[in-house]
Image (cartoon, rainbow, N blue to C red):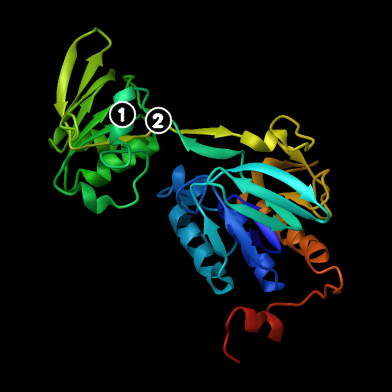
Amino acid sequence: MIKTDAIIIGAGPTGLFAVHQLGIIGLKCEIIDNLDRAGGQCIELYPDKPIYDIPAIPECTGEELTNGLLKQVAPFKANFHLNQRVEEIKQEDNSWILKTNKGNVFSAPNVIIAGGVGSFEPRKLTLKEAEKFEGSQIFYSVVNKKIFQNKKISIFGGGDSALDWALELSKTNQVTLIHRRSEFRGAAHTLNEVRQKEKEGKILIKTPYNLTSIEGDKIMTGIEIKHENEKLEKVKADYILSFFGLIMKLGPIAEWGLNIDKKTIPVNTETFQTNKEGIFAIGDICTYPGKLKLILSGFHEGALAARACFKRAKPNETYKFEFTTASKNIHDRLGLKK
């Protein structure tokens, strides 16, 4: 069993900043996320899209924001437990016991739910034969684009992710962009660039087509797609990238006895505690009068929740607010030189 001061569920920007806020007041935490990397929506939905409302940062991408937050929390050496979902939660005395789908067990007096609008899972290809190629030749996100170099790539989807990666990978690969509709829903300027690459012969666009079969036994060699007029066509493919979006679910959180209202959790805005003592909710998943679903709002919520966690994690100590500019304690925790 892993014991700590606080458990954060969700490694998006709000969850990452909560790590920072816990760390500067001397609390340890563990982070659990259903995705395979930190960043939440910023990484999965718009890693390359600009964000304009982060204080003192006129413009940054979702990936840049995530990387900055990870750098900011690095001094606190928090442990990340990725590709895991909290399946069970129960209370024992003044602590919460959490168990994940991988069998890991955690104990802490505080739980901070920073799960956005729930857990994120990629919307996968429905073909049964796709399963045996997932993780080797079929991917739902791009972690290392170098593996695709000089390969034949079939990209499925009509949104920003599909268009962006079609452009990026067309620099070194043969790219076929396949969409079930004739119209794309991505940004107009990106679509114009894709159309230009089509004219240059660097991207082949197939619409409106659906995937009907995958060819190959142990190694995928190609795919078969079907036009809406029932015409079948074979396409050689070394890799498939599928961007049909994410499925967002509350998952087991819905069964934790929280006063969930329209897939959000009401909180006390003084501490961001839910109706369960020691369970806090911050970010898009929490609701209160005047709530704004902004990353900035989540940062504020995480700061207040962290201070409330201190009282439960260290009941025999009195929390004393300190400014980061002058506090020796905070400087030591951050590893700053005098």
Vertical position of residue 330 compared to residue 254: above or below: below
Vertical position of residue 16 compared to residue 33: above or below: below
User: Where is the C terminus found, in terms of image quarters?
Assistant: bottom right
Dot 1: few (<14), some (14–19), or many (≥20) neighbours within 10 Å? Answer: some
Q: Quadrant of residue 263?
A: top right
Residue 143, given in percent of the width and then of the height, sits at 35, 51
For residue 124, which numbered disc appears in the image? Answer: 2
Indicate the secondary structure of the residue bearing disc 1.
helix
Q: Amino acid at mark 2?
A: Lys
Q: Which one is in front in this view, the residue at disc 2 or the one at disc 1?
A: 1
Q: Viewed as shown, does residue 335 lie left or right of 142?
A: right
Residue 267, given in percent of the width and then of the height, sits at 80, 45
Closer to the camera in the image, 101 or 62: 101
Asked if marks 2 and 1 touch (Cβ < 8 Å), the reply is yes
Residue located beneath label 1 in the image:
130
Q: Quadrant of residue 106?
A: bottom right
For residue 114, which numbered disc appears in the image? Answer: none
Q: Residue furthest top?
A: 229
Give the Cα distance between marks 2 and 1.
9 Å
Closer to the camera in the image, 5 or 177: 5
Q: Amino acid at mark 1?
A: Ala
Closer to the camera in the image, 2 or 315: 2
User: Where is the N terminus found, in terms of image quarters?
Assistant: bottom right
